[in-house]
Image (cartoon, rainbow, N blue to C red):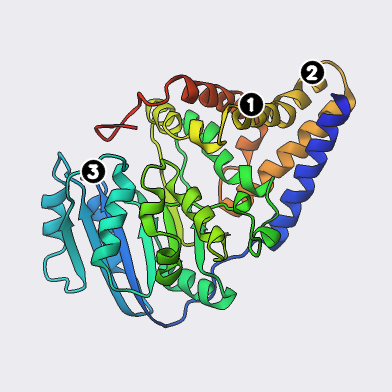
């Protein structure tokens, strides 16, 4: 066990260091001549509409762009606010979502309808709680073109304010920074090496259609990761890049949202019970065991603990997160283990935006 802990920590430290030095950043902004369709599904997002529309209206260096919103049967003032915000904007459109069919989840059904209504060569999907800089889309699409890729996921900076957010949200980026060699994954034909974040996702229309479109992930809560896997299966290539300079997202703002948000997805994230057990063991080895060894008087335990903290610090530096929060990694790992177990116990019963997932 002692050797296993040591090897695991050393390996993730090396992977994280390589990714820290080589991760792709958004390209310099330049005029994009390809036609772009920006798809934005919204449901009960009245508190996000004003800032969301403002960031989209500010986009520059796009010669041919259309912005299409789909109101997914919102039960608040989302549609009214959207209609008010978009008055006089010729390249902004709102469509009303059809009722959710059996076998689909809300987001993938909305994106499916949006794709059918769009005309662009490049598809950009953005969640309602994401805020992007005025050159975010042009720089990201320029990166897609320069890298010769079929899809791209600029990973937004995860805004964290409350204690629970600061414990959990930084693990999103750390999880792939410390485990997946991105330079290899970018050109890999192995779907298991796919990483993506649907908060801000860019894909060539031809590649998306070849992969089966959003229908191929119609029932997948983790639609972003599974879509990336399907794209790779159909011979497309893509990667995640550090999008912290062009996008940000406050994903959850309370413990209740975190608990429900992770409960709806973590039981799907690892594929099976065995995968979930493997994830828990990994978190125990890298997050809890080193500090247990250290506090029991083992000097090598302190070395292992600080190596893991360094990986968290590297991830925080890239993602513009709080470096100090890296010290709490053992507690973060413990809470995430709880959320994995909770997700399996509660699967199929979680309510999200008025729907059971």
Give the residue at mark 1: 277
Disc number at residue 239? none
Whether label 3 touches label 2, CB < 8 Å: no
Distance (Cα) linking label 3 and label 2: 54 Å
Q: Secondary structure at mark 1?
A: helix
User: Within 10 Å of the Cα at label 2, are there few (<14), some (14-19), or many (20+) other Cα atoms?
Assistant: few
Question: Which residue lies at the image location 44% right of the left edge and 59% below the top edge?
Answer: 201
Q: Position of residue 208 (x, y in %)?
A: 42, 64
34 shown above or below 239:
below
Question: Which residue lies at the image location 71% right of the left edge and 37% below the top edge?
Answer: 309
Q: Position of residue 313 (x, y in %)?
A: 67, 44
Give the residue at mark 3: 101
Q: Is there any visible trace of residue 141 in the rendered image? A: yes
Q: Position of residue 67 (x, y in %)?
A: 26, 67
Q: Is there any visible trace of residue 157 in the rendered image? A: no
Task: From the viewer's perspective, tell me whether residue 177 is left or right of residue 56.
Answer: right
Task: From the viewer's perspective, tell me whether residue 337 is left or right of residue 354.
Answer: right
Give the residue at mark 2: 295
User: Within 10 Å of the Cα at label 3, are there few (<14), some (14-19), or many (20+) other Cα atoms?
Assistant: few
Residue farthest top in this picture: 296
Quadrant in the picture for residue 62? bottom left
Distance (Cα) linking label 1 and label 2: 25 Å
Question: Which residue lies at the image location 34% right of the left edge and 48% below the top edge?
Answer: 129
Task: From the viewer's perspective, tell me whether residue 117 is left or right of residue 260.
Answer: left
156 shown above or below 208:
above
* Quadrant housing the N terminus: top right
Q: Please report whichever mark, 3 or 2, sits nearer to the chain's N-terminal start.
A: 3
Which of the pair 10/318 is nearer the observer? Answer: 10
């Amino acid at each position: 066990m002692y050797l296993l802990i040591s090897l695991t920590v050393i390996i993730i430290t090396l992977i994280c260091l390589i990714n820290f030095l080589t991760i792709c950043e958004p390209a310099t902004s330049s005029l994009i001549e390809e036609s772009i369709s920006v798809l934005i599904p919204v449901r009960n997002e009245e508190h996000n509409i004003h800032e969301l529309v403002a960031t989209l209206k500010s986009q520059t260096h796009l010669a041919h762009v259309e912005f299409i919103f789909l109101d997914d049967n919102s039960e608040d003032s989302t549609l009214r606010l959207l209609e008010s915000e978009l008055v006089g904007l010729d390249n902004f459109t709102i469509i009303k979502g059809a009722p959710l069919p059996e076998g689909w989840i809300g987001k993938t059904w909305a994106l499916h309808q949006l794709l059918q209504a769009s005309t662009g060569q490049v598809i950009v999907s953005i969640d309602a709680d994401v805020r992007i800089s005025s050159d975010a889309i042009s720089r990201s699409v320029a990166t897609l073109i320069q890298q010769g890729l079929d899809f791209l996921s600029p990973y937004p900076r995860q805004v964290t304010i409350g204690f629970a957010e600061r414990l959990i949200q930084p693990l999103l980026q750390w999880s792939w920074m410390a485990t997946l060699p991105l330079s290899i994954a970018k050109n890999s034909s192995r779907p298991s090496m796919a990483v993506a974040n649907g908060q801000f996702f860019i894909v060539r229309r031809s590649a998306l259609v070849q992969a089966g479109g959003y229908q191929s992930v119609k029932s997948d809560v983790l639609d972003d990761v599974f879509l990336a896997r399907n794209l790779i299966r159909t011979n497309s290539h893509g990667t995640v890049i550090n999008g912290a300079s062009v996008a940000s997202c406050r994903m959850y703002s309370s413990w209740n949202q975190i608990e429900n948000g992770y409960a709806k997805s973590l039981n799907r994230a690892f594929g099976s019970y065995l995968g979930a057990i493997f994830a828990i063991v990994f978190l125990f080895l890298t997050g809890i065991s080193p500090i247990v060894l250290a506090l029991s008087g083992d000097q090598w335990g302190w070395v292992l603990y600080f190596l893991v903290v360094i990986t968290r610090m590297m991830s925080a530096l890239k993602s513009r997160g709080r470096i100090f929060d890296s010290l709490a990694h053992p507690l973060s790992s413990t809470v995430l283990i709880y959320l994995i177990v909770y997700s399996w116990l509660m699967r199929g019963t979680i309510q999200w935006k008025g729907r059971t997932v």
